Amino acid sequence: MPMPFQRCISTLHQRLLAPVGLAFLLVSGLFANPYASHAEVELPNLGDTSSIMISPAQEKMLGQRWLRAYRSQVPTTSDPLIIDYLEQLFNRLIPHSQLDEKRIDLVVAENNTLNAFAVPGNIIGVHTGLLMYAKTENQLAAVLTHELGHLSQRHYARRLEQQKNMMMPMLAGMLAGLVLAANSNSDAGVAAIMGTQAAAQQASLAFSRQNEQEADRIGMQTIVEAGLDPYAAADMFEQMVRANRLNRRPPEYLLTHPVSETRVADARNRAMQYVRKPVEDNLEFQLVRTRVRVGAEETPQIAARMFKSELEKESDNPDASRYGLVLALTEASQFDAARDALAPLLEKDPTRITYQIMRSDIEIAAERYKAGLEILETQLKQYPDSYPLIIRHAEALMKAGIYQQCADILERYSRKRSKDDYVWYLLAEVNGLAGNILGVHEARAEYFILNGVYDRAQIQLRNALKLTQGNTYRTALIEERLKYVEAQMQVEGF
């Protein structure tokens, strides 16, 4: 049976990961020779973009290469509830944005710092810490619509009109800076960023003041048209200003999106064009935010004490605090206490998928697999397309040792979410447990492709070919995939 492989690619492919403490400092060297530091920052070969204005199609292509390089160097969350919540929120916002192409690629870095970013080609990155930092869904939406504003106005491409030779160093600088931000929580990491702001600005890590104002204005239009609170942007900016004033270490977001008192006032003045109405917060945001808060604590016992204290002192959101207590108790293996704590939430809102998944999670963690699976399967009959339910069901089947059913589910689902690397990761794992060695190689290859690790994908596909002799159709499929990988390796300089 193949050994399980780690989801964090850096442990498998060390040459892709530059030393994090040096990554940002490498940016300044890129401007003397944009290609000299390729080995250190591992930016794929982006081709010659100096002679023509970059088109949306080129942005998409370059953005996808950038995304693969970022994924290969940054731990990303596989929590289906967090991913699904953000996807649903973007689905509400994007139709009201000015994006021509209404689809984005979302990457969620598992990092408790406040940060979000936009990359050419409709890529938006979110640190899990942004969910913890925003106090309401409207505040979170204010940040996300600002990033959508940068994309819709093609600020990177417009900057290139004046700097025709900047695409390679710009993307290299973005990659180095954002990898550093996602991998470092230390003051030294922040000092490195702050100490190289001039290089960062040259690499377009910081947008111009004019572009920031435009993204603010477009973002507020999106918020208003989506029926959210236009005052939330100013509220969020004020929190950032306070954080910058009070903390020795400013949020990473402020290093790339500086917020001044003037910017806060501008946001407030724009919002005053609209009548402020009471906006009820989305409980699902608070529940997902709570998941991040639990993960940020050193131990589940500390988290449990924190949420117990909130409940005793009249929490701002008692349901979210109780949910956090249930999560922490489950992680601490206090299953009876977790069931008791969850009961009031289920009684109050028995149809909420998040609570039903929590109910199943307790049983699966307690190794009561039959009970946990029954809960998930009942919910799937009502919500067959729910991403969190499908992923939790697959994970539960794998833990219960029901490997073939799990593999069949993931095989079908991989066709629907072919760009979801976690689906391929799970499929590779369960195929290995089921003894399907061909399936292991194929799924691992797709996982490595999505993470830009083409030499590993090539090895997996070549191993797969050895197992398909006599199966003409399967051999042809794998050979075509291998041709694609080898072509990408040539383009991206492997």
Image (cartoon, rainbow, N blue to C red):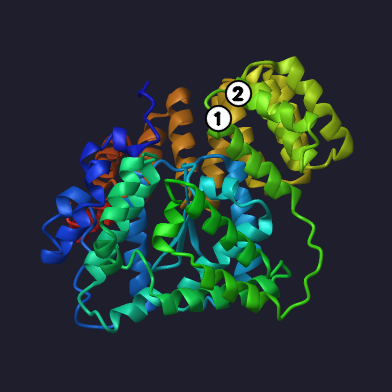
Say which residue appears at 28% left-offset and 45% top-offset. 453
Say which residue appears at 79% left-offset and 38% top-offset. 318
Residue 472 rendering spot, x and y as whole percentages = 34, 46
- Secondary structure state at the residue bearing disc 2: helix
Residue at mark 1 to residue at mark 2: CA–CA distance:
7 Å
- Classify residue 15 by image quadrant: top left
Count neighbours of disc 1 (C-alpha within 10 A) and say few if under 14, some if 14 to 19, many if 20 or more: some
**Amino acid at dot 1:** Glu
Give the mark nearer the N terminus: 1 vs 2: 1
**Amino acid at dot 2:** Ile
Residue 453, compared with residue 63, is above or below; it is: above
Residue 159 rendering spot, x and y as whole percentages = 33, 78
Residue ranking furthest to the right: 347
Tell me the residue that label 2 is attached to. Answer: 302
What label does residue 297 carry, if any? Answer: 1
In which quadrant of the rendered image does the N terminus lie? top left
Residue 13, compared with residue 84, is above or below; it is: above
Q: Is residue 425 left or right of residue 484?
A: right
Q: Are marks 1 and 2 in contact (CB under 8 Å)?
A: yes
Residue 281, compared with residue 342, is above or below; it is: below
